[in-house]
Image (tube, grey):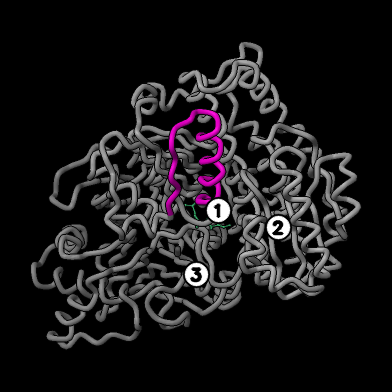
């Protein structure tokens, strides 16, 4: 939800800011803008549309400056247009702000400004915020840093902000609550600050993750000053980034999504590395080891997540219940947080999130913490808000995921959940030794199996050609592959804008079967293990109604192949592994259809990668 970048130092700010915005565009891309410090004040350029449009707009301008801030937006307050785009200037034109988040009490702040007759140009909460900070600054005679502290104490909502002041050249003031902000410290004590580390990595690997309710002052050549809203000094603990620039580039692929689909043998391997020891038949999850007894004694596990991460949770439910016999419930973060859920101290709540910043998941976890539950996180982004909010966790280590549609993060989450289920099952003695060992061996081979599934790419592309003009799709699966059907449908709808629904196959006859005809392709996960005969019956029911079937089957399957219009084979594996394999062709199918329809695969309309607003 919106990407922000700021730079101050001894180098030209513009190239750093614009390249930073390009890295952050996955967070929102309906408008973009930049503010640069000039000798006679702050200049702002902003436009509706993507960062490339902003770049085009400013190409003849004098952009020389060593301090600036920039923004790529996902609209919350006000339509996406140039006026509502960030940066916003205060009424005097002296302060400029970029903001990611939502100011919930903007109406109260607005009324305070209206009483003073301060004019507003946009419909945004952000313009209100910058003017409110200026009002406090003028009224108290404090500097920008202090005025920001005072103002934010009266703000309700979520924000990551970067501010500059024409009267204090070279300085940036940063603050966060609820939305992420990372400060990079360059070699010459120059500073680059951004919503995530991706714009920073090209400049420096030394960073500080600004904490909740902290305000920072960044001035080139000087130590950063970090204080709380209550003016307590904080000693910033610097960390080193462990990502590489290559991980953030497309590496010859047309889209990040395709690159990330192809990275899955490696990302699944990375999510197991150091945790699975096939020779010794052992799984160890260092991050949660101190809490293992607590988990084993839990009355139940509740998993919370949104979108694809919620689907991973559903897969995890099957795995943990089957292998460790602990009751599991899976909840949408957004529903959980608003329905006064029953949570007891013997509950373990697991937050699943690629970004680690999803507002609804984070709020659900905070609620569970208040009620005394043990919180675990399964996050991809190291140091993210959810990773820090939880008592312990297991990072997925899938590497940066840039494509808005989640792919490798999902398979990494599923891998980590299987590791967890196996570890708990082993400790509890609920899984027969033979199966435990066989599953460890199979899981260790999963990267090779995924590699093999990726070889179906061309075939999937041909199938995509047949169906790209369909208006609706149905995805069916049973058991552990029901969430895979949901995930396949989500992938298709979000990047191709084709309506798609996922169902447990047996539910079809309770309603969706009415939709079946030759214009409603049905994608069925029909692997050998797990309810195979039942799903074959479901396929017959569809064929009897002229439905067209794309089936994901186990290698060598003849029965479904004889019924389906198209079959895509995946290697034979334990049922617990089938989500890891069956998902891949569904990702590819969605990808190819979206490309054929000319969609912007990495940046689908109306979406953003990191949903830091509710
Ligand atoms: C779908 C997708 C979203 C996210 C959801 C949660 O492809 O990307 O549905 O899965 O917004 O995001 P995280 O995992 O970052 O909490």
Q: Nearer the viewer, mark 2 or mark 1?
A: 1
x 58%, y 45%: residue: 409
Find residue 257 and report its horizontal and vertical position in percent. Answer: 67, 55
Q: Earlier in the sequence, mark 2 or mark 3?
A: 3
x 73%, y 60%: residue: 591
Label 1 residue near ligand 1, CB within 8 Å: yes
Q: Earlier in the sequence, mark 2 or mark 1?
A: 2
Is label 3 in a helix, a strand or a loop? loop
In reply to whether residue 330 is colored magenta, the answer given is yes
In reply to whether residue 9 is colored magenta, the answer given is no
Residue at mark 2 to residue at mark 3: CA–CA distance: 30 Å
Q: Earlier in the sequence, mark 1 or mark 3?
A: 3
x 49%, y 60%: residue: 17
State the extent of the magenta-drawn residues as a range. 308-331
Cβ atoms under marks 1 and 3 closer than 8 Å? no
Label 2 residue near ligand 1, CB within 8 Å: no
Residue at mark 2 to residue at mark 1: CA–CA distance: 19 Å
- Look at the picture and state if 446 lies above or below 59: above
Is label 1 in a helix, a strand or a loop? helix
Foreground residue among 292 and 410: 292
* Mark 2 neighbour density, 10 Å: few (under 14) some (14–19) many (20 or more): some
Cβ atoms under marks 2 and 1 closer than 8 Å? no
Label ID, residue 451: none
């Amino acid at each position: 939800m919106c990407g922000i970048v700021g730079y101050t130092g001894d180098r030209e700010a513009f190239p750093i800011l614009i390249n930073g915005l390009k890295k952050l565009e996955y967070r929102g891309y309906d408008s973009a803008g930049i503010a640069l410090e000039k000798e006679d004040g702050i200049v702002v350029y902003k436009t509706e549309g993507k960062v490339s449009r902003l770049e085009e707009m400013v190409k003849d301008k004098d952009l020389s400056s060593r301090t600036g801030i920039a923004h790529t937006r996902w609209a919350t307050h006000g339509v996406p247009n140039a006026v509502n785009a960030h940066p916003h200037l205060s009424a005097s034109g002296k302060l400029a702000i970029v903001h990611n988040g939502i100011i919930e009490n903007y109406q109260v702040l607005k009324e305070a400004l209206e009483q003073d007759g301060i004019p507003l140009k946009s419909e945004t909460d952000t313009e209100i915020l910058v003017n409110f900070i200026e009002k406090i600054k003028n009224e108290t005679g404090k500097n920008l840093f202090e005025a920001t502290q005072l103002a934010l104490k009266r703000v309700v909502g979520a924000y990551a902000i970067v501010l500059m002041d024409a009267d204090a050249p070279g300085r940036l003031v940063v603050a966060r609550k609820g939305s992420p902000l990372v400060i990079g410290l360059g070699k010459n004590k120059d500073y680059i600050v951004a919503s995530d580390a991706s714009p920073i990595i090209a400049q420096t690997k030394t960073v500080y993750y600004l904490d909740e309710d902290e305000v920072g002052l960044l001035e080139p050549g000087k130590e950063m000053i970090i204080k709380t809203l209550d003016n307590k000094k904080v000693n910033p603990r610097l960390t080193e980034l462990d990502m590489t620039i290559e991980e953030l580039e497309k590496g010859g692929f047309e889209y990040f999504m395709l690159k990330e689909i192809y990275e899955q043998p490696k990302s699944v391997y990375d999510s197991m590395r150091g945790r699975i020891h096939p020779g010794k038949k052992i799984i160890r999850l260092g991050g949660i080891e101190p809490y293992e007894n607590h988990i084993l004694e839990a009355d139940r596990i509740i998993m919370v997540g949104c979108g694809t991460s919620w689907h991973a949770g559903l897969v995890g439910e099957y795995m943990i219940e089957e292998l460790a016999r602990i009751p599991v419930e899976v909840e949408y973060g957004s529903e959980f947080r608003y329905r006064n859920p029953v949570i007891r101290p013997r509950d373990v709540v697991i937050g699943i999130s690629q970004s680690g910043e999803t507002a609804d998941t984070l709020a659900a976890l905070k609620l569970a913490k208040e009620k005394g539950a043990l919180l675990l996180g399964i996050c991809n982004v190291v140091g993210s808000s959810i990773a820090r909010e939880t008592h312990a966790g297991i990072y997925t280590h899938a590497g940066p995921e840039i494509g808005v549609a989640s792919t490798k993060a999902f398979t990494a989450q599923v891998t980590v959940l299987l590791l967890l289920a196996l570890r708990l099952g082993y400790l509890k003695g609920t899984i027969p030794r033979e199966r435990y060992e066989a599953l460890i061996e199979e899981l260790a081979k999963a990267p090779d199996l995924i590699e093999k599934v990726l070889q179906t790419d061309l075939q999937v592309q041909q199938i995509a050609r047949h169906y790209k003009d369909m208006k609706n799709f149905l995805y069916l699966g049973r058991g552990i592959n029901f969430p895979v059907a949901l995930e396949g449908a989500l992938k298709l709808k979000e990047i191709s804008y084709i309506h798609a629904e996922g169902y447990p196959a047996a539910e079809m006859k309770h309603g969706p079967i009415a939709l079946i005809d030759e214009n409603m392709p049905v994608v069925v996960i029909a692997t050998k293990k797990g309810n195979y005969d039942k799903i074959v019956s479901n396929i017959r029911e569809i064929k009897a109604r002229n439905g067209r079937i794309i089936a994901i089957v186990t290698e060598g399957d003849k029965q479904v192949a004889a019924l389906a219009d198209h079959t895509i084979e995946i290697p034979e594996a334990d049922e617990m592994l089938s989500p890891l394999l069956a998902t891949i062709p569904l990702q590819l199918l969605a990808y190819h259809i979206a490309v054929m329809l000319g969609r912007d695969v990495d940046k689908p309309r109306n979406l953003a990668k990191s949903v830091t607003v509710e």
